[in-house]
Structures are given as C-alpha cells and as structure tokens.
Image (cartoon, coloured by chain):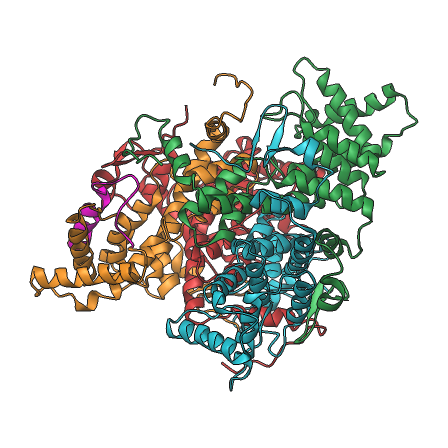
Chain colours: A cyan, B green, C red, D orange
C-alpha cells in the first residue's frame, strides 16, 4: 500500500506523526523537535537538541564556499527562482563536501564496536590503524581527515568534542575518530581531523541514523544559502565573480565595467 | 570587491557575522538564532523565535505532498545522492506551492500601510476590496487564498494567528489578510484563507525581509524531505507510485509484482 | 484520466508518439527529429532542422559561463553525481540568462501581427517604438537587447538571421526584432540585439511553441555542461576557482597550494 | 591557471574548441557534431553519429517514467521555472536509472580486453561468468541486467545491437555484454539484458569516454522532459497524480474534484 507514517491530511486537519499539526505541534515544539519527530517519530531529549543545534550551526555557512558561489551564480541568471538557487547550492553536498559526514559516520560504525574506554591506548590505536589500512587497501576514501583550508587544525573539532562530552554522548565512535586522527597526525604528511569526522562520530555515538549526517548539513546549509541570496539581492557579486573567472584567461576579453 | 559580510575563513578560524564559529557560536546559539544571524546580522528575540519556529514547523511536512513524491521518485533512480532527492523536492517550491508565502508578504506590504486598528471595519474592507480588485484587474495571482485540499478552512491559519498575537506581532498586514479573507469568503464561490496568507502576513508584520517567506519554507521542507528519504530507505514506495501512475492508462502493461 | 500522448510501455514494447521506439524510430530518425516528435507529434522539415540545429549549437557553450562554473563547483563537492552538476548548471537558465529566449519570443508575438513586409520602414519603426515604450511603462523587462560582454555586437545575431532567411523563415517577428534593435541602437545609450532576441524571433517566426526557446537552450547547454564535467575530470579547475574567489577578500587566508 | 579548452569569448567573438561559433559552426554543423566537438575536440564520423543518434533517441522518453512524473509535479508547484522542472527530472538519473549506462560501460571495460572474436563460446562464457561472480562477491551492482517492466526482453537491445553492427562498432564489449546476458538468462531466475547494458557496451566499443553513457541519457531525457512540460501546460495531470497518490491511504481525505 502506498502510505507514509510521516503524515496525512484531510480537508480540515493535517496530521504529522500522529499529532495534529495545528493543535498539538504549532507553538508547542520548536524546529529541531519537529525535525527529529518527522524523521524518527519521537521527540529529542534536551541533551540531544544541544548537540543537534551545534551541528546545524556548523552547517550554516562560513562565507564564500562553493555552495554559496553556486547559489549566487544561479541567482544571477534566474533571480525569479530563489528555490532554484538554493537547490543548486545543495547539489554540491556530496562525497567530497558536506555529504561526507554521513560517510564518516558509517566508516566509524564499521569498526567502533571494537573500541572500549577500558582499552589501553595501544589497543585503541591498533583498531584505528586497521581502519586506515583497510580503507587504503580497498581504495576507499578515508572520510573526515584533511581539509583544503584547515590544514593544521579544524577549529570546529575540539569545540564539538567538548559539547558532545558535556551532553554525555562521547563514546566509542568518537574514541575511534580521535585514535584515527592521532595516527594520521603522526604520519610524515599529517592529516588533521576535520568537522566531518567530528560530526560523523557524534551522529554515530548518538545512535542516530547515519543519514542524519548529510541531513543536518543540508538543513543548516539551506539556511546559510538563503542568507547569501538575501545579500546577493542587495549587494550582488555574481557578475563580478563571473568576470573574475573569465579574466584569468587572457583569451577572454571583457568590456570595461563602471565602478560600483 | 568580491566579499561577503556573512563569513570568512582562515586556516584556523571560521568567522560568521563577525563572531568566531567555534568559540562564540557553537554551543551558545541554536539553529534558529543562527538562521537569523546569518541572514540579518542580529540575533532574534524570544518572541520572534516563537513565531519563526511555528512557521518552520508548518513547513516541515504533511505526508505525500508533491515535493515528497518528487524526492522519493528521485531517490528511486539515484539512491546514491540524497542531496539530489532533497534538491529535487525543493524545486517545486514556486509560485503555486511553498514559494507563495514570499509573494503573499509582498502583496500585503503593497497595501497595508493604509490599514489601521483605529479604522472601522468598513474602512478596512474597502482596502481589502481594492487589493482584490486591482490584482484581478492586472491579472496578477491573488496569493494566499484557496487550497486544493483545505477548501473550507486551513487549520494552520487560526493557530498561527493566535501565536502571532500571543507574541505581539499581529499588525496591519494580518488585519489586511483577514479583511481580504473575509471578503473572499463572502463571495458566491468562497475562497478560504490558506497558510501562505497567514505566514506572509506574519513575515510582513514582523518586518522581516519577504524573502524569509520562501526561505523558512525551504528550510522546513528540507527537514521534512529528509524524513521521507529516511522512510523510503526502509519502506520504499517509489516503485509502487510509479506503477500506480502507469496503471491509470490501459495502454501501459506492467508485469505482475510479488506481494510485499 | 492520467495519461500522456507522448508515450507508453508494455513488457515488450515502448511506444513514442504512436510509433514503436525500437522498430520505427531507432536508426530511422535523428535526435532533432526525436525532439520535435516528442514535443509536437510530428517530424520536422529539413529547413526546420537546419534552423533548430543552429539554435542548439548556439546553446551548447562558450567557455566559463555561470552555468559552467556552477557545474564545475558542484562537481568539486559531489563528483559521484554528474547529473547533479549538470542539473545545477541548468538551474541558472532563467529570466536573465538562457531562459530569456522564451520570453523574447512571447514579447515579439504580442506585437508582431502588426508587422508586414509591405509597410514602410517608418511604419515598422512605430510598432517597435510602441513595444519599447509599453514595456518600459509597465516596468517589464525588454528581453533580447544588451549583453554583459557583447556590448557592441553579438556575433550570433547576423549569422542566425542569415540561416533563418536561407531556410525561408524570416518573417514578422524578425522584422519586429530588427526594428526594435535599430531603435535601441539609435539611443544615447545604445543596446545591441543579443542572441536571445534572435532566437526568440526565430522561434516565433517558425510558429513553434515559445517554450521551445528555453527548451532548446536547456538541451544545448546540457551537452555543453557535460563537456565541462568531462574536462573537469581530467583538468580540474574547481578548487582554483574557489581559491580565487576567496582570495579577493583579505580577511580570508588560504594555505599555500603546491604548483600544478 | 583557470582556463578551459572548450571555449572563450571576447566582445565580438565566441570561440568553441578553437572555431568561431558564428562563422565556422552555426549552419555548418548539427547538434550531435557540436556535442562531440565540445566534449572531445573533434567531429564525429557519420557512423558514430548514426549510433549516437540511436542512443539519444533511446534516452528521449517513453511515457510516464519517474523523471517525467517528477518534472510534472515540480511544474505543478513552480510553473514559472521550466528549467527547474527539467533539472528535477534529471536528478533521478543515477545509479539505478539512466546513469547506469556509464557504470555498465565501466563494468565491461574492466573485463573486455580478455574477449576476442576468435575465442570459443566456452572461453567467452568463462570471462562472463567471472565478471558476474566477482561483482556479486564484491557486493557490487551488476549493471545492465534486469528491468522492472521489460522482464523478458528489452526491445531496445536487439535493435541497438543491429545498428552498432551496421555501423561497424560491434566489438569486445558487446561480446562480453552478450555473453553475460546469455549466462544470466540461463539462471533459475533469469535476468534480461536491458538498454543500459546495450548502450554501455556500445559506448565502450566506440572507445568513447564512459561519461558519455550518462551524458547522452541526460541530453536525450532533457528533450523528452520538455515534451512533458509542454503537454503539462496544455493538459495538466500533475494535480491528478497527487490526488491519486493521496487516495491510496484512507487516512487522507480529499475534497471532490469537478470532472474535467
């Protein structure tokens, strides 16, 4: 039968997860409650919400990322469809950016049942080294380590670790992520732990569906891209970005632009 | 100069609206704070957050909407790219669904400076009738009235009005929306006020940028679509929807499917 | 009834516009035949195909347009989903780029029944001036004139006019487009006729559905974007574009990159 | 350096692959020539064009596929942005539909250097069985076999094989695809060879970049989706599809709709 447990509708009611949207939900729950309710048919604890909010805030934005540039250039051609600009920005959330959180979560879950706080550091390092060795051997991407900009240290990692600990979720997956990170920093070409590893480990330790890794990034970035479009409406830089790119190849010749 | 005030990045810091993401924001603000901060460079008041959360909860989902069906059918063909399924669902947020909130806000803002709580009901009705008449005359869509399912009453409208009043935002745009709604219900073919009118009036009365109309719907629906994809991973209905559509035209002939 | 005249399917046949795909179409028609057959349930004449091919070739590509930059930056984050990169690029085909052809066609069709080869040049100019005046008065975009790069002359216009004449389609809409173009070049701030005007007039004179304006651009650009993704696979420039944009604001600080 | 070999632009010229778009290309080459020129910097032979056209015609459309339903439901909500509806439809071209051609090409290329027309049928079967066994063993998808509708025979396969032979491209990859197909039909639960296998083998035998597998499907389907949007403008079925899906769950209650 074609049906969903997420919601249904009649002429005068809307039901979400068995609750009346207008009477039971609006005004009584906040957005993060609603996100968890829709996805998992339960409300989150306060500790969960603290961590989920931290992850959503990470996803929001940090300047002219590829997704923001994409949204602005799309808006340049199609200002009538803000949703198209946002959707275009989200299409870059894949195996290399943003979508990596989900994959990092799965990567840790494959090995983390062998981790244990009672183990010696050497024992934990052994699991981490096996994870690294087997992924390299199988030519699989090692998700969550190295970053094109934050080469030495990704500032989000330590902060998220602290928030996770403060809310009681630091567990086997974070232990593993940290052990992998330590091993990779000890290499001749060190790789720093990035936010995807931190968020992936968090999602795994919270026992959330790994899909929440990419899900939270999409929701957070959706909000961030809207800020970019709002700014683009008032201080557009799309045409300048285009001109800048064209100007790198001397075969292109642009007309002079008036100063802004 | 190509720059954004939203954020910038160095090798060891990420700055969002002048604040250090790791030190100042993560763990200190929630997602809705972050959304407002990114878009408008200020934090929202508690009253604002109450209303914004109610709007985001409206946007979340309510079962098999076109955007949810689109996300599920996209996932059926491309399960490797959850972001593509979500982006596809958001592409339907346009002038007829979801995107109408922004347009409703603009529609009310064009006339609402003529509204005033001290006016008689007749004076307010006159403004409402002018809005209706001029939009019809100019062949412009009348945003926020009528609904393919909630023909008599959209249950979200009264509830949102109450929340807006409780938080001190009920103002000229809501007065106008209500006066337009009363005029349209008095017609031979009555049109009910729908959630887009309610949300559009709310955004206008909160003095938010009208773009927040579509923005909040995109963020809310982004979260709702993720719930659909999570459910589709476990209880897929995409193939059944496809079969169902094909079965309506007898020229199509499908093979028998095993019972699920 | 839910049905389409475009095609249907059984376990052992696929029918497109009443013809057997495998037996009647594959090997017997080319892609442009198929495009017209699907959209209009007839095959094109040779003269039509000559013009449609010229328009599709215009749409293909010309270097690092916004759509190409968008596709490359999307591919940078999500190399697993080439279709997402192409879809992102197409999302910029709106009221300012690419999608303007459809709007130009409609703009000419509104006035062109008043054009006639037997009119004097002055009579034709009068219609052109009325089109310009009324669109400006109604604050409507004047589609097809002015270009951010081809400020003096868009090289595609004269060539397409010639191809249209050679194939017997030069008619009232082209006359109008040319008269509008002449009037706009005579202004203090001259605006050149761009390819959208030329293609829009062509589509109108061929009596094709105006939607074919954006349709042919989407098909052409789809092919062009694929070339960009193929090149990006071998000689990636996505990361460099991102770095270049970030480098414009001194608040951003990037790590040093090795020479390529 | 940020540059592309595909094209560049000056104020009065557009260059595509070193040729002047207006002078050398428009009117002299057709769309399929242009597609190959952009992607590979050479013009195709007539034999290549025959096969490429057959593949593009396969991609066009065949009724209410998931991509067509997605495009129509997206258009229902956002009729102002035809490009969004088409982009949404293309987002479903992934590892299960449409995008499978590329993956099938790669799958055959991994083993086909061991195929040879001088081998006995038994020797060729051995290679096919090894391909099947190793993909199953590594839990990789076996691309190109089985179809949700064409369970016995996909009518496009035999026709494309013939066209490929007629144009002199039948080679090792097709031999392998056919041997795999024979082996899979001999199983207790037979799987038919589908169009993805046929097109993937074709692309491999033509020594085209495997990316052309998904590329040609995207271009073909782009044209097909436009036909659906054109039809949807005149005979809309989007709302009916939505109603139909909702009607499957008795918890949903729709208002009565007037007969059309």
The answer to which quarter of the image holds residue B217 is: top right
Residue in front for this viewpoint, A67 or A74: A67
Image side of residue B244 versus residue B255, left or right: right
Residue in front for this viewpoint, C203 or A109: A109
* Residue D190 percent across, percent down from the top left: 20, 46
The answer to which quarter of the image holds residue A121 is: bottom right
Image side of residue A96 versus residue B182, left or right: left
Residue in front for this viewpoint, D108 or A189: A189
Observer able to see residue C214: no
| Residue positioned 81% across, 38% down in the render | B205
| Residue positioned 36% across, 32% down in the render | B246
Q: Is residue C93 above or below residue A258?
A: above
What are the residue bounds of the magenta stretch?
A: D143-165
- Residue at the extreme right: B118
- Residue at the extreme front: A118
* Residue A30 percent across, percent down from the top left: 70, 44
Locate the N terminus of chain B and report the quarter of the image it occupies.
Answer: bottom right
* Residue A37 percent across, percent down from the top left: 61, 43
Q: Is residue B151 above or below residue C57?
A: above
Q: Is residue D153 magenta?
A: yes
Q: Is residue D244 magenta?
A: no
Residue in front for this viewpoint, A30 or C191: A30
Locate the C terminus of chain B and report the quarter of the image it occupies.
Answer: top left
| Residue positioned 80% across, 33% down in the render | B173
């Amino acid at each position: 039968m074609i049906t969903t447990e997420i919601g249904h509708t009649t002429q005068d009611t809307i039901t979400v997860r068995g609750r009346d949207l207008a009477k039971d939900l609006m005004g009584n729950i906040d957005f993060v409650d609603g996100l968890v309710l829709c996805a998992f048919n339960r409300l989150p604890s306060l500790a969960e919400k603290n961590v989920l909010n931290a992850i959503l805030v990470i996803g929001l934005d940090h300047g002219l990322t590829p997704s923001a540039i994409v949204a602005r250039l799309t808006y340049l051609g199609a200002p009538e469809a803000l949703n198209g600009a946002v959707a275009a920005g989200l299409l870059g959330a894949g195996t290399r950016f943003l979508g990596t959180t989900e994959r990092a979560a799965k990567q840790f879950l494959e090995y983390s049942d062998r981790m244990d706080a009672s183990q010696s550091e050497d024992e934990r390092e052994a699991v981490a080294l096996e994870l690294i060795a087997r992924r390299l051997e199988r030519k699989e991407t090692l998700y969550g380590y190295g970053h094109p900009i934050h080469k030495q240290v990704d500032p989000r990692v330590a902060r998220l670790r602290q928030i996770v600990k403060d809310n009681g979720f630091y567990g086997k997956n974070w232990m593993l992520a940290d052990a992998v990170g330590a091993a990779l920093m000890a290499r001749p070409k060190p790789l720093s732990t990035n936010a995807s590893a931190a968020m992936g480990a968090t999602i795994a330790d919270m026992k959330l569906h790994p899909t929440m890794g990419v899900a939270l990034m999409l929701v957070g970035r959706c909000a961030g891209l809207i800020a970019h479009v709002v700014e683009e409406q008032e201080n557009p830089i799309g045409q300048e970005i285009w001109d800048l790119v064209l100007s790198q190849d001397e075969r292109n010749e642009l007309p002079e632009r008036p100063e802004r």
